[in-house]
Each structure stands twice: as structure tokens, then as C-alpha cells.
Image (cartoon, rainbow, N blue to C red):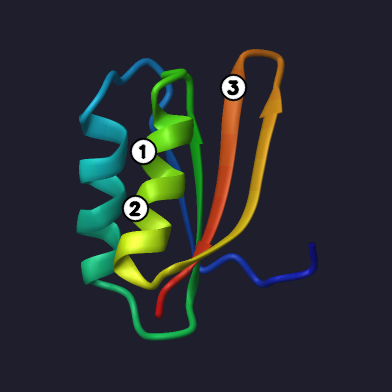
Amino acid sequence: MNAVINVELDLSGLVCPLPLLKTKQALNHMQSGQVIKVLATDPGSERDFQVFAEQSGNKLLELQQLDGQFHYTLQKS
């Protein structure tokens, strides 16, 4: 993935619903087309981020799990 990251959030250690809530708050301050990268450790966040992207129209560019950490890259619609 070669997208320019505009905002990075490390939400490690937070549990549902905080990773998604904090991501939504950050997206509210971003412009359309900007990209946010989120790190989370809550296993439930994987489904949350997929459903959120589908319902909100924001594009989930990347979802990876590395060493117990989830990496999400979203582009604001």
C-alpha cells in the first residue's frame, strides 16, 4: 500500500467500543480523501472496522494482523 498517511492513532490496550469511537472522532476532523492508520489490540475491532467501513462509506484500504496487533488503514469518504 502506497497511500500517504495523514493521521496515525495507537489505540493499543483499549477495548470495544473505544478503538472505533476514537477513530470516528479523528475522522470527523479530517478532510475527504485523507488517510488514517490505526493500531489496536482488541480482537473485536476487526469486525467493528469492517462493518464501520461498509456502513459509513469510508474505504478500508488495509487490514493486517501482526503479532497480536491489528493495523487498519482507512480513507475518509
Q: Are marks 1 and 2 in contact (CB under 8 Å)?
A: yes
**Which residue lies at the image location 21% right of the left edge and 69% below the top edge?**
28
> Mark 1 packing: few (<14 Cα in 10 Å), some, or many (20+)?
some
Q: Is residue 34 left or right of residue 29?
A: right
**Which residue lies at the image location 24% right of the left edge and 71% below the top edge?**
29
The C terminus sits in image quarter: bottom left
Q: Which residue is label 1 attached to?
A: 48
Q: Which disc number belongs to residue 60?
A: none
Q: Earlier in the sequence, mark 2 or mark 3?
A: 2
Query: Mark 3: which amino acid?
Result: Gln
Q: Is residue 16 left or right of residue 46?
A: left
Q: Give residue 15's quadrant in the image.
A: top left
Give the spatial CA distance, label 2 vs label 3.
19 Å
Q: How many marks?
A: 3
The nearer-to-camera label among 3 and 1 is 1
Image height of 14 relative to 31, above or below: above
**Which residue lies at the image location 41% right of the left edge and 61% below the top edge?**
54
Residue 1: x percent and y percent?
79, 62
Residue most extreme to the bottom? 32
Q: Give residue 3's quadrant in the image.
A: bottom right
Q: Which disc number belongs to residue 69?
A: 3
> Mark 3 packing: few (<14 Cα in 10 Å), some, or many (20+)?
some
Give the spatial CA distance, label 3 vs label 1.
15 Å
Q: Is residue 34 left or right of residue 5?
A: left
**Which residue lies at the image location 25% right of the left edge and 24% below the top edge?**
16
